[in-house]
Amino acid sequence: MRAHTSTSLALLSVALFAVIVLKTSSGEAAKLEPLSLESSPPELALLMGELQRLTHKMALSADAGNAELANFYMHESLEQMKKIQTEVPEYEGQPVALLMDRMGLPTYATMQEAVNTKDKQQMLTALDTVIQSCNACHAATLHPFIRITRGTEVNPFNQSFQP
């Protein structure tokens, strides 16, 4: 009896939904159209949050001495930076793309050199340079309260960063 009642309620809900969604007030079939997203620009905080996550994983990889994984996350971080430069070249009057190009990207060349050596200490030193450039850029764009750190004290990810 209970299963029959649940099934009946489910079918009734589906039928009611179909009537509401597929019929207009005049009784004609409704036209289904995709939602327009053109009015909302990409949110910089979300894009930067993804860059922060990738940089944190790069840091955990370097801290574990895993050059191969650090290289992977460095590549992904660079891809995210390009995405930010393309999608949000300016934010609240600040030249985000230009600053990333001048302040951020050059530090990744040093990180690449360190990763190529596979030396943990060199990777951590280069990583600190990347992080310093992030914080300098935040200060330059009037967001000095956003301070990035290595964050290697705790691993919040369900992932091992060991080689």
Image (tube, rainbow, N blue to C red):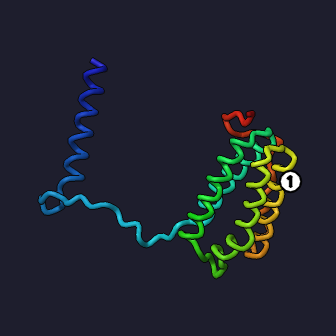
Residue 4 image position (x, y, % from top left): 25, 22
Quarter the C terminus occupies: top right
Q: Which residue is nearer to you in this view: 79 or 22?
A: 79
Which residue is denoted by mark 1 in the rendering?
125
Residue 149 image position (x, y, % from top left): 81, 54
Q: Which residue is nearer to you in this view: 120 or 49?
A: 120
> In the drawing, does residue 114 fall left or right of residue 33?
right
> In the drawing, does residue 19 fall left or right of residue 87?
left
> In the drawing, does residue 109 fall left or right of residue 14?
right
Q: From where the camera sits, is residue 53 visible?
A: no
**Quadrant in the picture for residue 61:** top right
Residue at figure coordinates x 28%, y 33% from the top left? 10
Residue at figure coordinates x 29%, y 20% from the top left? 3
> In the drawing, does residue 32 fall left or right of residue 36?
left
Residue 35 image position (x, y, % from top left): 34, 62
Crowding at mark 1 (Cα within 10 Å: few <14, some 14-19, many 20+): some
Residue at figure coordinates x 79%, y 44% from the top left? 118
Quarter the N terminus occupies: top left
Q: From where the camera sits, is residue 162 visible?
A: yes
Against 30, residue 143 (above or below) is below
Against 100, residue 72 (above or below) is above
**Quadrant in the picture for residue 84:** bottom right
Q: In the image as oriented, which residue stretches furthest toward the top?
A: 1
Q: Which residue is nearer to you in this view: 33 or 83?
A: 83
Q: In the image as oriented, which residue stretches furthest toward the bottom?
A: 93
Query: Could you tell me how many numbered marks the image carries?
Result: 1
Q: Amino acid at mark 1?
A: Thr
**Quadrant in the picture for residue 99:** bottom right
Against 108, residue 11 (above or below) is above
Mark 1 secondary-structure assignment: helix
Residue at figure coordinates x 86%, y 53% from the top left? 125
